[in-house]
Each structure stands twice: as C-alpha cells, then as structure tokens.
Image: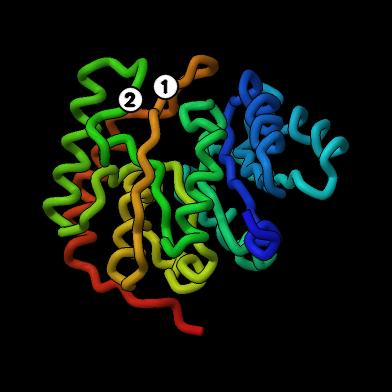
Amino acid sequence: MNQAVDMDKKVVIIPTYNEKENIENIIRAVFGLEGDYHILVIEDGSPDGTAAIVKRLQEEFPERLFMIERKGKLGLGTAYITGFKWAVEKKYDYIFEMDADFSHNPNDVPRLYQACAEGADLAIGSRYCNGISVINWPIGRVIMSYYASVYVRTVLGMKVYDTTAGFKCYRREVLETIDLDKVKMKGYGFQIEMKYSTHKLGFKIQEVPIIFIDRKEGTSKMSSGIFGEAFWGVMKLKMRKIKPRKA
C-alpha cells in the first residue's frame, strides 16, 4: 500500500452494551491490524463494567482509543449517528461500523478500506453477495435474514444483497451528504435506511464478501421488534424523498 493511502485517517465505531467478554479482545484485534486505525466506542451505560475496561485501555492507547458514554440503551441507530457526527467533525477520511462480538472478523476491516480506497463510497461486508456465508445461526434466523434482504431489495430497487449488514466502511463525503438528523429508524432498519440514502444520493456501493460468525460470548441484541421496525419502515422509506443535507 502506498504511503499516501496509508496516511488516510480511519476510525472504527463500535457500539457497546454489556460487552465485557469481548471489548478488550476486539479493541486489541483492530489495533493489531496493519495501518493506523482508531476506535470510537459508543457505550450505552452497560451495567456489566464495559466502560471501565475501555477506560483502562485508553491509558494504553491514549491517541487511538476514544469513547462516548451515553446514559442508557438508546438504540443502534442513534449510537452510530452519534459516532458519525463525531468522526465527521474530527475529519476522518474513512469511517467504519463494526460489532463488538467478533461476528465481524477484524481481519476483514482492511478489505473494506481497500474497496473504498479504490473507488467505492460505501463498502459493505456482505453475507449474501456470494451465496449465504453465515456460521452458527439457527436455520430459521438465516432464512428470515436472507429473505428480509430480498424483500428490501425488491421494494426499494436497490442492488444490494445484504441490506441489513452492519459491517461497513464509508468515505466521509457520504456521511457529510446524508442528513443524519433526518434518519428515522433506530434498530436494524437503520442499516437499511443508511444504505438506501447512500444509493439515492448517487454514491457508489460495493459489497465485499465476508463470512459472518455468530457471537460466542455475551448475548444477542436481536428481537422480533427490530425486524418489525425494518419491515414497516421499508414501506415508509419507499415513499420518502431523500435529499442531501443543507450546507
């Protein structure tokens, strides 16, 4: 990788709620990657002590590890929007979304970065663009997730196979253009809305095939309500006009 590309400012945003089993390992894994990646943890008041672990690690990585603490579990979408605004303000060139639980392999982070560095505006770590690449999920959940993406793709006319994916890399220009204050969905529907906004505003989206492995430590935050929001939200999203943020 040439020196000019290597000087890009990159930050990985990791939302957390009760991730004490995973947070130190995921932080060390990202910092172990080649290239100068920073991490922003959005911590939603975990009662299990996740924030204390991050604060201890901040002493070890004072220039690379940052945390925003919030006063409760306020939703995935609002966590990422908080992180996006922070990252845009700090002028990061590439801004990543990533789970804390190792369902997203840290070794795939440079692959998403490379896709954006080579021309994509949004790179998606995709479970479904090359068949179905999911490990350790019950078959019912695999089917529900896969056909949810088919439904979204059909309704919204968006050529993205993994519409609910949460492992992504944005170029800063995308997040500067999307009106983040107008994003309405809070759960996994947020992931759909952000991709659709990126698509409608004319940015280039590229899917990068990954293998998704369900968490081994901690508990899943998935619920039927999250899927319900996404289902009905897609219908509403289809009717909305997506306009760029006013400067």
Question: Foreground: 187 or 29?
Answer: 29
| Three-letter amino acid code of the residue under disc 1 | Asp
In the displayed structure image, the side of residue 242 where residue 76 appears, left or right: right
Question: Foreground: 154 or 132?
Answer: 132
Task: Report the disc number at residue 134.
Answer: 2
Task: Report the disc number at residue 214.
Answer: 1
Q: Residue 220: where, in percent of width, then height?
A: 44, 23
- Vertical placement of 176 versus 115: above or below? below
Say if mark 2 contacts mark 1, CB within 8 Å: yes
Which residue is painted at 53% across and 26% down in the image? 101
- Most extreme residue toward the bottom is 247
Question: Foreground: 41 or 172?
Answer: 172
- Vertical placement of 58 versus 63: above or below? above
- Tell me if mark 1 has few (under 14), some (14-19) or many (20+) residues whose alpha carbon lies within 10 angstroms of its own: some
- Most extreme residue toward the right is 59
Earlier sequence position, callout 2 versus callout 1: 2
Answer with the quarter of the image where residue 150 lies: top left
Task: Report the disc number at residue 166.
Answer: none
Q: Residue 165: where, in percent of width, then height?
A: 36, 42
